[in-house]
Image (cartoon, helix red, strand yellow):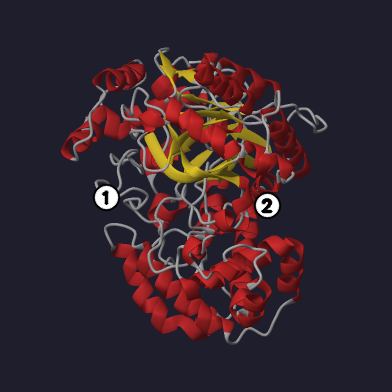
Amino acid sequence: MTENLDLLAEAEAWGIATSYYDWAGGLVHAPIETVEGLVTTFRRNGRTAPDTIVSGLRDPGRCAPPAKRAWGWALQLYSLRSQDTWGMGDLGCLSQFGRWAKDEGAGFVMVNPLLAALPTERQEPSPYYPSSRCFLSPLYLSMKGVPGAEDVVAPIADVASALNSTKLIERDRIFALKMKALAAIWQSFDGDRRFEAFRAQRGELLENYCLFAAMTEVHGSSWPEWPEDIRHPSAVGIERTRAELSERVSFHAWVQWLLDEQLEDAAKQIDLVQDVAVGVDPRGADAWMWQDSFLPGFTVGAPRDEFNAAGQNWAQPVFDPWALRSNDYAPFIQTIRSTLRHATGLRIDHVMGLFRIFVIPHGADPSQGTYIRYPHADLLALLATESQRAGAFVIGEDLGTVQKQVREELHRRGILTYRLMFFDGSETKDYPEQSFAAVTTHDLPTIAGLLSGADAEEKRRIGIEVNLEGTERMRSSMNDCVPPATADGIVAIHERLSGAGSVLVSATLEDALGVEQRPNMPGTTDEWPNWRIPLPVPLEQIARSERVHDVARAMGGAGRDGP
């Protein structure tokens, strides 16, 4: 008994929660085996438990605020096809959509993470499971906008354009075609001073990312199984391999430059809000580059809540808060700084992860997990520094189980919190000014899917338990805004949203078009086509859609500034 008490005391000193409160207010005791495993892991390399986490950084104050009260669109870019795309939405579409949205009075576009997956034949569909949170996916490159493409890739383009009519987005085929085309164009690339400047500016981070991509093409998608002499960025074989693969490293750097140029152009059309995913692919570049900052033996997830009775295991590596701090927070700083390139705003997925994160032992289910605490004062100070440096506001996605202290600290730091009509009701005028308001998110039903009952029917069809109480509560929150799920009702909901007290409000194209399928169904893999559903009409028709125009007009009410 004494040994357990000593273990629990040491665990608390390390920032390991020996118990926590769940979403319903019930006290949950962390499994002793999980606590012991975390303590043992934190003790590695001779470390001893500190008394507390004390911030050692200068406090820069608040994050930069939004420039004005505005409305915008939350866009799943991959879903926005056009006559020029190769099977999915790209940065050319983002530029076109941004120009149209700005003409309609929108002040910003918030896009899904555009991050690079592993450069392998099978492309990870989830934008929240990237190889790197610092670099972009070639899937989003507009081939029409690549210099020299017309003369080289015409036969490939004919094949690729046929992918615009597939029922679901075929990332694997798109990636293969784009990489084949880019390899052909690269052969005739004569160099560019802007490319050299980009490469110098992104420096070692870019070089290591591109080396990782090149090594993955040679050695496969699981770096822990690579030859030992290249398994770590400082391993003895790295510089030899860098020289051997220099041509391919340069190719990947060139692709990143093209992506950066196109993203910069899109940002000139309208303000962009970029999205920081909560984690990374354990086989990916960030996990390889910064492996010394991750916690071995555990993955990140979430405990059970009202809509996920079994909890969630996101199968992503977890930053070790003590190793992160001893490495001067380099992975965190580089992630935030990279995401803010060409961005006016930043959305942080699961912002509670800056305070504490739910960790689960490898191979266990979420019931075996518990929380570990992070040096949030340091992380928020760094976030505010980067926000001020870029002149970009910050939105914290604080949906789910949230400690009171978290929202108080977010408010103090000038970070906008979320308000959803599905959860917070239709009295939108009472939403706090320092918030970002929307009807729903990509993880929840669309308006049409909720009100028609189609979303609940789909969940039953694929064997997911429907939370009847929660679903009815969301439906009832719409009842005083909307008749049955008609186009007029959807416009009425957005009129109510526009009147929110929040400084920023956002609509989705799925809702404006009356789409019943949600982009993502949490807790599923093959049961639902997560992140693969295109919008029902292409960009050219969206720009002419009366329904979308009516939603835009409704969103521009209540004194929301245009461009």
Give how far apart the Cα atoms at labels 1 and 2 are: 34 Å
Question: Which residue was labeled with disc 1?
Answer: 526
Around disc 1, counting alpha carbons within 10 Å, would you say few (fewer than 14), some (14 to 19), or many (20 or more)? Answer: few
Q: Nearer the viewer, residue 212 or 561?
A: 212
Left or right of 434 in this view: 96: left
Is residue 272 visible to us here? no
How many numbered circles are shown? 2
| Residue ranking furthest to the left | 461
Q: Quadrant of the C terminus?
A: top right
Residue 234, position as x, y percentages in the image? 67, 64
Residue 281, position as x, y percentages in the image? 48, 52
Residue 116, position as x, y percentages in the image? 52, 59
Q: Amino acid at mark 2?
A: Arg
Residue 114, position as x, y percentages in the image? 52, 54
Question: Which residue was labeled with disc 2?
Answer: 341
Q: Relative to 253, say whether 76 is above or below.
A: above
Q: Secondary structure at mark 1?
A: loop
Q: Nearer the viewer, residue 130 or 538?
A: 130
| Residue ranking furthest to the right | 58
